[in-house]
Amino acid sequence: MLHFTSPALSPRAIPPLPARTFSAMSETISLADSTPDHVAGTWYSVPDLRLRDHQFTVPLDYTIDRNASPKISVYAREVVSVGKEEQPLPYLLYLQGGPGFECPRPTEASGWMHKTCEEFRVILMDQRGTGLSTPLTPSSMSQLDSAKEISEYLTYFRADNIVNDAEFIRVRLVPEAGPWTILGQSYGGFCSVTYLSFAPQGLKQVLLTGGIPPVGNGSTADAVYRACYPQVIHQNEKYYKRFPQDVEIIREVVKHLAESEGGGVPLPSGGFLTPRGLQTLGLSGLGSSSGFERLHYMFERAWDPVIVPGSRKQISYYFLKAFENWLDFDTNPLYILLHEAIYCQGDSSLWSAHRIRTEDDGKFDAIRAVKEGRPVFFTGEMVFPWMLEEVHALRKFKEAAHLLAEKKDWPPLYDIAVLNNNKVPVAAAVYYEDMYVNFKLAMETASQIAGIRLWITNEYMHSGLRDGGGQVLDHLLGMLNGRKPLF
């Protein structure tokens, strides 16, 4: 089993991206100050944990005068072990994966949360636009009048402003505005590297789990998807080796969808399930632990039984409902609308995954696979323009999504010169067979972050932080506090 720890990597010099000024970073606000932009709630409980809500009023746009900018709300939940509410614990900010997903809601002290709350005062921040942080949903975004207004509004919801929000919160929560530890999972790790680039003074140490982003000038969305598609194929091959009976079942479903009126069947929500939509199940089914099993058991109930002889064969309501429940595109639309933008620095994505998919010589063509008797391959963490038609709740955002895909003047998200001279202790879990964050690209970035320590393993998949209980976090902390030697 591949499972080892590397010493610190030395950076190699490449031309830096243009510097980006973060205006929230220079404030120092005493905890004793009573400010109208921060409201703290009272403590409450779940088993073995104490929690407190914080709501912050922050600028939508940090690049202009704070009084002139529209305001949004950012929510953060403070979590400690029972009895430690008043103890002087160090602070740890958790940055959730995504983009476009809120932080987990603790129900008990278990897994990595149990481990973390024993040592830290944990801050679970809903990234702007998610959860309780001015959530951008199909209903809330209906208040914006046009596709242009929606697309312009959404440009303020990338990692740069997530970091600005984090700094806004840090100087109001941490005593004497001291630095804190951050834990970035998946896209939260991308945000953490942005944090290292533009506000390292706010950081005591950084923990990354499956979240080292591509940072170089050549790390375009196209480069990301060219690197990721082969790993998706590999995961498909592994799935069918595990469940060979599913090859024919899935081909039958694709054939049925393709031959149905309009090339698909209606979904309970009003959307439309087509063969290409079916393939998006790979997003959750192929890249995390128990995903293979869940996918297999879902296809076990793909068909309604024929109760009356001669009745037409049809896909079951159970399966159609399970398909919609599996994917959160309608409740968390930022995932589709901003997904490719997380890779854009000074260029446009132009629906990169959709274009790169055509370079695969038909490997991901479901209908062609059926005709040729091949297994149907699922896609991975990719978004496609036709999703804006087939997901009912997103149809109103089709034009805005195209405007975002065409936008060229995205500002930089990383400063390679700063990363090359990084002084903040960083430890990262890198999952060798990660379907979402390409191993090769992650290693290229790691070579640019001075002093980073890597734990490279295939013991876990992308969901290792969740699946490993406290083991992954304990290993990373051990790498930084001296319990895991350099050699």
Image: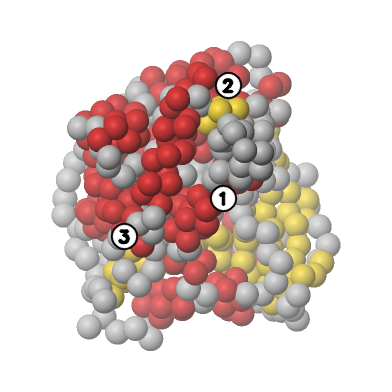
The first of marks 1 and 3 along the sequence is: 3
Within 10 Å of disc 2 (Cα), the crowding (few <14, some 14-19, many 20+) is some
In the rendered image of this protein, does residue 476 appear above or below residue 158?
A: below
Residue pictured at 75% horizontal, 57% vertical: 53
| Alpha carbon distance from label 1 to label 2 | 29 Å
Relative horizontal placement of residue 358, taking residue 390 as reference (left or right): left
Q: Position of residue 239 (x, y in %)?
A: 36, 56
Q: Which residue is mark 3?
A: 241
Residue pictured at 63% horizontal, 70% vertical: 121
The reply to whether the C-beta atoms of the residues labelled 1 and 3 are less than 8 Å apart is no
Relative horizontal placement of residue 264, taking residue 143 as reference (left or right): left
Q: Quadrant of residue 120 in the image? A: bottom right
> Does dot 2 land on a helix, a strand or a loop?
helix
Q: Which residue is mark 1?
A: 301
| Alpha carbon distance from label 1 to label 3 | 20 Å
Q: Position of residue 260 (x, y in %)?
A: 50, 24
Q: Quadrant of residue 244 in the image? A: bottom left
| Alpha carbon distance from label 2 to label 3 | 37 Å
The first of marks 2 and 3 along the sequence is: 3
- Give the amino acid at mark 1: Arg
In this picture the colour scheme is secondary structure
**Residue closest to the eye, 43 or 278:** 278
Q: Is residue 334 visible?
A: no
Q: Position of residue 9 (x, y in %)?
A: 22, 65
Mark 1 or 2: the one toward you: 1
